[in-house]
Amino acid sequence: MDVEKIRSQIPVLEHTAYLNTGWSGPPPRRVAEAMKHRIDEELEKGPIMAEVLEAGREIQAQAREAAARVFNATVDEVLVTRNTTEGINIVLSGLDWQQGDEIVICDMEHGSVIAPSQLVGQRYGVNVKVADITATDSSEAILTKIEAAITPKTRMVFVSHILYATGRRMPAEELRALTKGKGILLMLDGAQTGGHIELDMARSGFDFYSIPGQKWLLGYEGSGALFIKREHLERVHPAHTGGRGIARPADAHNFQPVADTMEKFLGGSVSVPVQAAFLEATKFIEEVGIGNIEQRNLDLAESAKAKLSEIPGVTVTSPLERRDSSGLVSFAVDGQDPVSVVERLWANHRLVVRQVGYPAATRASIHFFNTEEEIDLLVGGVRELV
């Protein structure tokens, strides 16, 4: 992996130590250029000219194929969306919930898991059960706690694949084995996975999985992708629709939705420039290789955790074992508010991190373009604060 060549394509790295990809990744120049090229094409030729429309359809088709490659799924199981949360809501709003059904989540979740689950609970009388886990729980302990929350009424377990506050990699495949054996659906929020770790829907057997385009994939906001296992397409109904979701447009007043394909979730027009950027971003990631990226992320994160752990008064809240880890490294500084730590690291070193809650900590998001020198800058900056 030629890290310097990669870094030369990401302009922000010329003046900033960017350790916040888990919020939003810094786009490579070629990704921005792909977006701009499509905008210019619409500007100069007109957005509804035949050749522009055809080029747009081709971009959308290629973006969908690219999303399928990210998931290692078939194209007919994948939809390009606007973000992780949209994909989550397509699934939750489309299932035929019954009063008394149960969804199991955990208490360290992001709002994109909590809020849609609670909305389903309020709307349909579904009971949202919360498994209480801690930052120090092992994968085995997490599985035990989630299993303890399951009852005969449980229809879905819904968790993040990587927890945003600690970077813990949840035992997703073990959860799949647990839920499959009980006839329970498993949905994973992949807000911190696409472009970060290798995904394999064909092998894993997950039921539903949603990712963003603007984080670890290094695309732009307004892009994401949803995977629905083929056998579940019939049971997920479109909660919103439009002209693109009509099976027979010439007979729209006798409305029938598009047959059980991902196209039935298309409610209207999309931003082709954003999808052009998404497509180019996936190519950028593919050229480096997701396996290479994942291992480099883990190597750098391991280094950061080891060095931060040596500083008196600093507690690493992320898992230390490699199998449980990701490129997210969270740490707490005794007696210092995480917001203050974030602000001072920026003011002193132009180093971008963010604060997280539960447990309260400062989080560094380490991606393959980051360097050991930037890890040392982070560690040195934290040591100064202590």
Image: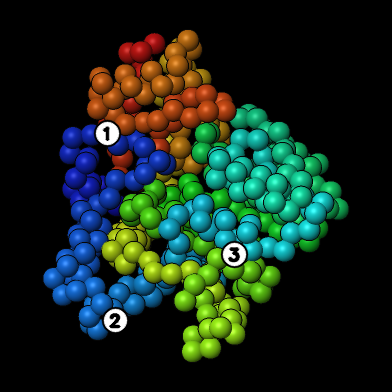
Q: Residue 54 shows which numbered tag? A: 2
Mark positioned earlier in the residue sequence (1 or 2): 1
Left/right placement of residue 316 relative to residue 97 reads left
Name which residue type carries label 3: Ala
For image coordinates 27% across by 33% down, the residue present is: 17
Q: Residue 239 shows which numbered tag? A: 3
For image coordinates 38% across by 66% down, the residue present is: 270
Q: Residue furthest bottom?
A: 250
Mark positioned earlier in the residue sequence (3 or 2): 2
Q: Residue furthest right?
A: 152
Left/right placement of residue 9 relative to residue 137 reads left
Indicate the secondary structure of the residue bearing disc 2: helix
Q: Residue 259 shows which numbered tag? A: none
Left/right placement of residue 29 relative to residue 217 reads left
Query: Alpha-carbon distance for marks 1 and 3?
Result: 42 Å
Closer to the camera in the image, 45 or 83: 45
Q: Residues within 10 Å of mark 3 (few under 14, many from 20)?
A: some
Q: Residue 17 shows which numbered tag? A: 1
Which image quadrant is residue 55 in?
bottom left
Name which residue type carries label 1: Ala
The nearer-to-camera label among 3 and 2 is 3
Q: Are marks 1 and 3 in contact (CB under 8 Å)?
A: no
Left/right placement of residue 42 relative to residue 352 reads left
Q: What percent of the width, then of the height, locates residue 2?
A: 25, 51
Residue 59 visible somewhere in the drawing: yes
